[in-house]
Image (cartoon, helix red, strand yellow):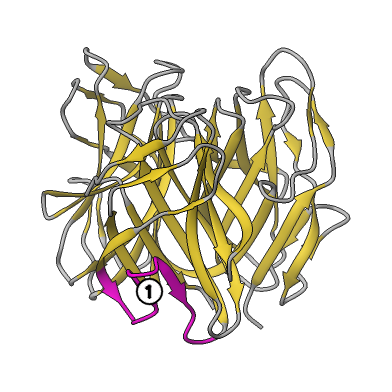
Amino acid sequence: MTTAVAVSDISAFNAPNATFTKVPYANVTYDDATEYDAAAHSFKASVAGDYEFCASLTSLPASLTLGFELDLFINGARERAFAGGGNGFQQGCRTVHLAANDTVDVEVYQNSGATVNFATNVYWDWLTVSKVDSHVSLGDASGFSAPSMVFTKVPYSTVLYDVANEYDAANHDFVPVTSGDYQFCASLTAVPASLTLSFELDLYIDGQREKAIAGGGAGFQQGCRTVRLTAGQTVAIEAYQGGGTTVAFANNVYWNWLTIDKVASHASVSDVTAFSAPNMTFTSVPYANALNNTGEFATGTQTFTAATAGDYEFCGSLTSIPASATADYELDLYIDGAREKAFAGGGSGFEQGCRTVRLNQSQKVSIEVYQGTAAALAYAQNVYWNWMTVNKTK
């Protein structure tokens, strides 16, 4: 039986200052191969393979500004961080290779100076696990300098695995040997150089900027995006920062990484029709231009309708820039018109995230935005930052 796990909400818990604490994801929605131990809050792989973990946690209402991170722990040892920042919401995804019976936990770390209570939140606290076809995993990046307002290739350098010899470590490029759809998830930190540096990560295909996959001002950035490639194309991750001076990005074995999975893409939609989102109201995001589509995404209604039952991973991105560089808003999945879960949020003017949901045939999914600036917020077109992808994971 193929791995597919979804856990909703947490048991309320305390996270001491400057200590890794296991997140007690509590309510199992589905667990097809009986791999999640709800009492121990751990996943145990039934077979060896590649597994994508996506998790979300919020400190609200306790703290809107609390800085914390989420890390994977494998067999009790810290593996990598996959989400972090200072806005009270954290969400991220990371793929890891596991041996049969390896155990994986998600742990939170915060250094506010005091113990923090994480309360239950049915919309923001969740965990999903999917078995995937991973091709490349890279850990850390060689230290490099990024001039202000210039795209600079991130030199991911440590090859954890490269099953088809598709990563060029000398040039820091991925070159697929077969055509298909590939999901890139990348992470980079400017810490300790700057805890507050604002920067973004973008995909470049054959030397041309494709789309941004992560951005904000917390000193940590992580995001995922799926693209359709032909064999022999080259893909790189590039960083852009506008701080006014050159910034040095140091080695960081826990925060600098890149994974590449081959996936089954069902839709990729670029940009939005310009729209206005009223204050404190969920508003459907009008993703507009289909790059590829199995016929399941309707641009007229901004909805995805599942042709067959299964598990689908939705990734979405939206920016309020240039309207507002600091607007606080979130992105949520709606299924058949009902709010399901939030999967991105914060106050940086950029939001991006992913979430996997189990759908019945003909169920409809939309992405909706919610903002609380006290006034209507205009979202303009942005071909690089506004996008949505849908992959079928099972």
Q: Residue furthest right?
A: 39
Return the residue at label 1: 297
In this image, 67 relative to 114: left or right? left
Asked if residue 52 shows in the view, the reply is no
Q: Is residue 170 magenta?
A: no
In this image, 245 relative to 345: left or right? left
Q: Residue at x 75, y 67 (%)?
A: 29
Q: Is residue 301 magenta?
A: yes
Q: Quadrant of residue 65?
A: top right
Report the amino acid beneath label 1.
Phe
Q: Nearer the viewer, residue 294 or 245?
A: 294
Q: Is 363 rendered above or below residue 242?
A: below
Q: Position of residue 317 (x, y in %)?
A: 39, 49
Q: Nearer the viewer, residue 183 or 391?
A: 391
| Label 1 crowd bin: few (<14), some (14–19), many (20+), radius 10 Å | many
Q: Residue at x 28, y 48 (%)?
A: 274
Q: Position of residue 198 (x, y in %)?
A: 36, 24
Q: Is 14 rendered above or below residue 172?
A: above
Q: Is 154 rendered above or below residue 192?
A: below
Q: Position of residue 235 (x, y in %)?
A: 21, 54
Q: Quadrant of residue 140?
A: top left
In this image, 228 relative to 46: left or right? left
Q: Position of residue 35 (x, y in %)?
A: 75, 68
Q: Nearer the viewer, residue 324 or 91?
A: 324
Name the quarter where the C terminus is drawn: bottom right
Q: Which residues are magenta?
A: 291-308
Secondary structure of the residue carrying numbered label 1: strand
Q: Nearer the viewer, residue 79 or 203?
A: 203
Q: Residue at x 35, y 71 (%)?
A: 267
Q: Quadrant of residue 14?
A: top right
